[in-house]
Amino acid sequence: MDLLSARINSLPVSATLAMAAKARELKNSGIDVIGLSLGEPDFNTPEFIKDAAIQAVEDNWNSYSPVDGYADLKEAICNKFKRDNNVIYQPSQIVVSTGAKQSIANVCMVLLNPGDEVLLPAPYWVSYSAIATLAEAKSTVIPSSIETDFKITPEQLEAAITPKTKLVIFNSPNNPSGTIYTEEEYRALGNVLKKYPDIFILSDEIYEHINYGTPHFSIAAIPELYDRTITVNGVAKAFAMTGWRIGYIGAPEWLAKACNKMQGQITSGANCIAQRATIAALDAPVSNIQYMIDEFAKRREIIIGLLKAIPGIQINQPQGAFYVFPDVSYYFGKTLKGKKIENASDFALYLLEEAHVATVTGDAFGNGDCIRISYAASEENIRNAIDRIAKALQ
Ligand code: GLU
């Protein structure tokens, strides 16, 4: 007899976390695995943020915070939205959560009914579809490929809409492809959505600052869509604070209230020390973190150059985030060192077993031709990893 619920049994394991766990396991058993599966900056959290956290401990910030976050943190978030995104939110429209992942889960849980449809322009981040499934909604994937720089068109968006469509999830800069939708492209997609007033838009902007030159644009800045857009962001990626677990939304007030209610029954307010540190992170000029972006930009050039030199690997120029998403379909149907490669999962497994490099299969992101490689790793690890991959594919 299966003691577990149908809910958990139907839920896939997070492919990114599963690969990271597998790499860790191999490492612990003495195998020299290079982990390029997890999207996690290898920098330390900047000193000025750590100082704020230490001060918060000294000042005894140890009690429960309001469920939706400290009032002064919500003020800081409103200021950030105004400064960086040209979007005006009031503190009553903000909810702080334990990471952007929880923010997304809150929104899906309070918006979606069984049978509702969620549009996922592909490639999409692994957990969107799993969270939609938890909310008993159905995901509809809108495909893209390397030929279109992993972007969908307004025509594709419109063709995917049905009377059951409740939510569309955008993510720019994109995990896993690094693609950035320009303002013009977002406005064109927005023009389609203006015609469908019952569809909500979740804009996941967690990689906003990991950007190599294309100006960031927030969909909530389109006035006609503001009332049905939820902007998700957090401090994990830009401030090297993945483990601090702070994410947040700006949303219509009624929706923020519902998320507050949901969170109040599940986790309550996010970690109080991390919230205090987040105020320091958001209040500081963005130039404070430029050294990390510059370093990622350097690594991007290195990894692209090295991958381009491997026959059969097709790669685009990611504009943001810290992933490359090469098309490896050339290898499908081929046998390498006695192992038949049928798909991207086989390919990623082959790289793990033969080259001892951990990557993530593109299937998890809705594109079965590609694999995701994170370059949020040291230059030495990147060079070694791609060298090993090249050898394993010879
Ligand atoms: N968002 C990161 C990634 O895609 C962290 C892992 C996760 O939460 O899935 O690798």
Image (tube, rainbow, N blue to C red):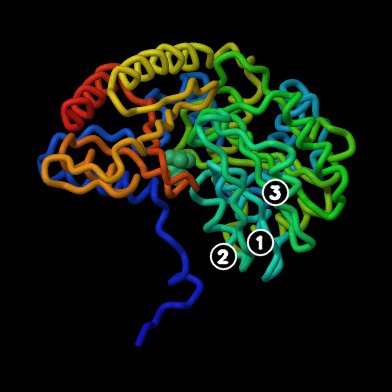
Mark carried by residue 109: 1
Residue 99, x across and y down, in percent = 55, 44
| Whether residue 277 can be seen here | no
* Front position among marks 2 and 3: 3
Q: Residues within 10 Å of mark 2 (few under 14, many from 20)?
A: some
Q: Which residue is mark 3?
A: 168
Q: Quick one: 80 or 36, which is closer to the camera?
A: 36
Residue 51, x across and y down, in percent = 50, 23
Q: Quick one: 218 or 251, which is closer to the camera?
A: 218
Amino acid beneath label 2: Leu
Please report the residue visible at 66 percent of the width from the left and 51 percent of the height from the top: 119
Q: Quadrant of residue 33?
A: top left
Please report the residue visible at 33 percent of the width from the left and 22 percent of the height from the top: 307
Q: Quadrant of residue 148?
A: top right
Amino acid beneath label 1: Met
Amino acid beneath label 3: Val
Residue 298, x across and y down, in percent = 41, 11
Q: CA distance from mark 2 to mark 3?
A: 16 Å
Secondary structure found at label 3? strand
Q: Quadrant of residue 356?
A: top left
* Quadrant that contains the C terminus: top left
Q: Quick one: 372 or 211, which is closer to the camera?
A: 372
Residue pushed farthest bottom? 1
Residue 107, x across and y down, in percent = 68, 54
Q: Are marks 2 and 1 in contact (CB under 8 Å)?
A: yes
